Image (tube, rainbow, N blue to C red):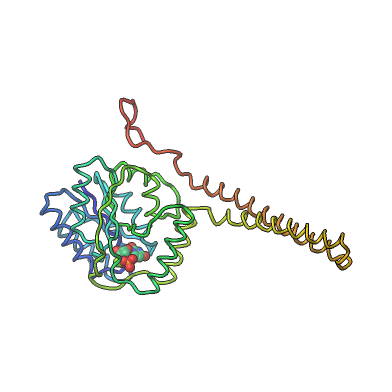
Amino acid sequence: MLSVIIPAYNEQENVPVAAERVSCLLSENMIDYEMIFVNDGSSDGTWEKICEQSAQNDRVKGICFSRNFGKESAIFAGLRYASGDACVLIDCDMQHPPETIIEMYNIWKNNDVDIVEGKKSSRGKENILYKGFSKLFYGLIKKASGLDMTAASDFKLIDRKAVDALNAMPERLTFFRAMSGWVGFKTEYVYFDVAERTAGESKWSLKSLFKYAVNSISSFTSAPLHAVTLCGVLTLLVALIMAVNTLYNKIVGNSLEGFTTVILLQLITSSIIMISLGIIGFYISKIYEEIKCRPRYIVREFKNIKGEEKK
Ligand code: UDP
Ligand code: MG
């Protein structure tokens, strides 16, 4: 069975459209499915629409949040309560073309792959500001963690094995796009064009995007912490060069009385402070890695090992 997970935040016009399109498509292709709408604390009639749909079709299920927790939380709630052999995540606004689900499903069914990731072959309509920020964001991620996610999206099919692995990650600040890569497994890609929104407008404000960017980067890499240590080392190098220079001036006799000491003290103490901060930062980053309690490794498959079905 395929679980289709659809996060919805203020999407009252889109819920019926999405339910209709996805259910038609899947029954046409004779795929056994369930559809899980996650209502992320919408302030409009989204939940009522979801209830309406589930009254008409018992394959439509709903999860309702107490408030807006963000798309990431909605995705993880969907994964937690999905019971399919594979889960597909798709946006409610149909910007991810549902036809691609069939393509993903066939790849998953006919090959030995665990994750089928949708990649944007074009980004669709976006304003210049959004384009600029997303470029900066992906640039930072790439620098910090080496992952190129420019074309990545949340549109993915994930096998049960990988879903269980994701469910086992206890961290609270999540970054689904990167985490689904982190768990590993065999990944295949399909390309899709971002469509226009069916109705309504994008739910991201500049503020929420900024928050998302900072959370994503900090939940996935501790590189900024190490930057402080690097600064400290650089200052120390400069300090050493300056020290030689000031001492030389002192010896030659063309320096003011007491000036040398001040310069040396300032240079050396500031670099020591920066390095110490960096070291503290390093330990904080370790604490931070540990506190996430991620599993140390994830096994994809067992053969002839007893007790493997035990979780
Ligand atoms: N979404 C959500 N919670 C939020 C913001 C968005 O569940 O706080 C959902 C939204 O309903 C949609 C998907 O995430 O199904 C993508 O949102 P949107 O279309 O606004 O983002 P964009 O396509 O502009 O990146
Ligand atoms: Mg959208």
Q: Answer left or right for 230 relative to 113.
A: right
Observer able to see residue 40: no
Seen in the picture, residue 260 relative to 44 is either above or below; the reply is above
Residue furthest front in the image: 252
Between 127 and 287, the one nearer to me in the picture: 127
Task: Using the rendered view, name the quadrant where residue 68 is placed.
Answer: bottom left
Q: Is residue 246 above or below residue 301?
A: below
- In the image, 133 versus 77, the foreground residue is 133
Image spot of residue 59 (x, y percent): 18, 53
Q: Residue at x 77, y 58 (%)?
A: 243
Residue 161 is drawn in which quadrant? top left
Is the residue 81 above or below the residue 134 in the image? above
* Residue 71 placement (x, y as % from top left): 36, 61
- Taking the image in four quarters, ligand 2 sits in the one at bottom left
Viewer-side residue, 95 vs 165: 95
Indicate left or right for 195 with 205 as reference: left
Q: Nearer the viewer, residue 217 or 173?
A: 217
Q: From the viewer's perspective, is 150 left or right of 13?
A: right
The image position of residue 210, as x and y in percent, is 45, 67
Q: Position of residue 16 (x, y in %)?
A: 19, 65
Instruction: Identify the residue at image location x=39%, y=61%.
Output: 69
Q: Total number of numbered labels?
A: 0
Residue shown at 42% from the left, 72% from the top:
206
Q: Is residue 82 visible?
A: yes
Instruction: Give the quadrant of the C terminus.
Output: top left
- Quadrant in the picture for residue 155: bottom left
At x 25%, y 40%, the residue is 112
